[in-house]
Image (cartoon, grey):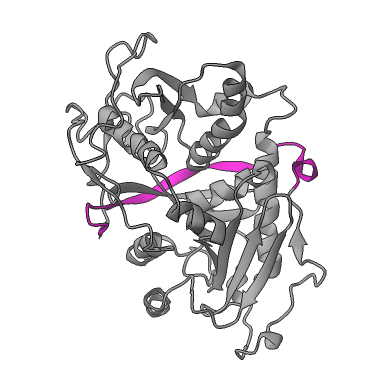
Amino acid sequence: MDESVQRDRGARSHKRSLDPSSLPPPKNPHVSSLRTHASFYQGSFPFYRLPSELGSFSLDEKRCYHGDARRLRFLSLPAGMESGAASPGWDVMDGFEDRYVQRDEDEKEGLLHILTWVKENRERLRGNGPESKRPVERDFVTWRGHLTKILCTPYETQEGWILAVTLYKGTLYISERETAAAHRKRKERSREQEKLMYSGYKFESYMCADSPDAAPCPAEVVNTNEAYCSVLLGRLASHSFLVSGEVDCKDPKSTNPSPPSCYVELKTSAQIRTPHQERSFQRYKLLKWWCQSFLLGIPLIVAGFRNREGKIVSLEKFKTSEISHLVRGDRQSWDPAVCMNFCNAFLSHIKKVVITDDPRVVYVFSWEPGKDVTFTVEPDSDQSVVPDWYVEAISQGS
C-alpha cells in the first residue's frame, strides 16, 4: 500500500444529533462554493500517478455481480487496420429492433458494485502502518465516470451534475445523483437518439471476441447489463483513491500485457466532413475520451466513424498520451492541466467541507454550467451513499 497516503482522517470523530444545526462547520467557515472557470486552473500539470490495477469484477446479462473476469473481452482488429486501409462498412444499427437488451436506467445502483468488491477484498485495502485506522486505506472511493465529469467541468457548457459524498471511517465515498434536467432528457430521448446509443454497443460486437483466438460475433444479442470492470489504485497530488470503471476490451497483442496498459477503449462518432465538425470533435468529444482513458491509464482508443446510414466507414486509433497534442494551440479548446488542476481543487474542497464521519450524513455538491459548485448537507439522508450492509460488513472487519 502507498506509504505516502495522507494521515488518517478517520481519527477525527464527531458526536452528532440529527439536527442540521449541530453539524460541525467546515474547517474554513468561508468555504461555501468553488469556482469552476478554466482561467482559475491554468498552470502546470499536477502530480498524477498512473493507476495500478488491484482487481476486477464482472456483471452478467442480468446485472448480477461476479468477482472475476468472465465478461472480459478481447480486441480483434479487422485486416487492414494496421495500414489504415480499413473501411469495414459495418451496420451498427443492425439488431436494434430484435437483438437488444437494455439495462434498466431507472434502477439507480450508486456505488453498489464497487462496494461489493471492496467488501470481498477489504483485507487487501487495509493500511499496513501501525497508525493507520482506516479499513479502506484510500481518501476516496468512486467510479471513473464521476471523476470524468469533474475533469470536464471547466469546459462543460450543457450538462450540470450532482455528486453525493459521505465520509465513513476516514474514507470519502463519492456517488452521483441524476439531475432533473438529465432525468427529463433521458425520458424524452427520441428513437434516433436511442439508436445512436445502441450503435456504440453494437460497434463493440464487431471489434471484440470472447477469447484471444476467437473471432467477433456481431450477430449476438447486445445486452447492456453486461460489463467488465477494473478496480484501480491511483493518486492525484495529495489525494489517494480507489476507482473502478468499465473496460471495453483487452488487446491480446499488447507489448505490455499488464493491466491497465493492455486495455483498449472503443468509441464511435459521426463521420467528419467539414472543418467545423473537426473542431467540434476535437474540442468536445476528444476531451471526454481523453478524460475517461487517462483516468484509468488506458493507453489506446479505437474509434469507428459512422455515416448517416449507420455504417462504419473508417477506423482510427488514438493514443491517449497524444490526444491533447491535437488541440494544443487552439485557445478555444481544452487544456488537460486545467482539467486535472480543477479535479485536484475539487477533491481538496470536499476534504475541507465533508468532516462529519457518519454513514447517515450526505453532503450534496451541485453544479450547473456557468456557476460555482455549491453544497448542502442531509444529516439523515434517505438517499444514502454508503448502504447499511456495507457499514455492517466494514464494521465487522474493523
Drawn side of residue 253 relative to residue 221, left or right: right
Q: Residue at x 40, y 21 (%)?
A: 307
Q: Which residues are magenta?
A: 37-65
What is the x, y in percent for residue 56?
33, 50
Report which quarter residue 181 is drawn in: bottom right
Residue 70 located left or right of residue 158:
left
Residue 389 percent location from the top left of the image: 36, 76
Across the whole image, how many numbered discs are drawn on residues? 0
Q: Quick check: 41 above or below 324?
A: below
> Eyeballing the image, is 99 above or below 358?
above
| 243 is higher (above) or lower (below) than 106 | above
Horizontal relation, residue 39 to residue 220: left or right: right
At which x and y percent is residue 37?
A: 76, 46
For image coordinates 25% across by 51% down, the residue present is 68
- Looking at the image, can residue 1 be seen? no
Task: Kindly tell me whether residue 56 is visible in this rendering.
Answer: yes
- Find out whether residue 248 is within the magenta segment: no
On-image quarter of the C terminus: bottom left
Residue shown at the point (72%, 22%) measured from the top left: 329
- Would you place residue 311 above or below residue 52 in this image? above
In this view, the residue in front, 138 or 361, is 361
**Where is residue 53 drawn, in percent x and y?**
41, 46
Examine the structure image and report whether residue 47 is included in the region drawn in magenta: yes
Can you tell which quarter of the image residue 313 is in? top left
| Left or right: residue 238 compared with residue 25 | left
Q: Nearer the viewer, residue 4 or 158?
A: 158
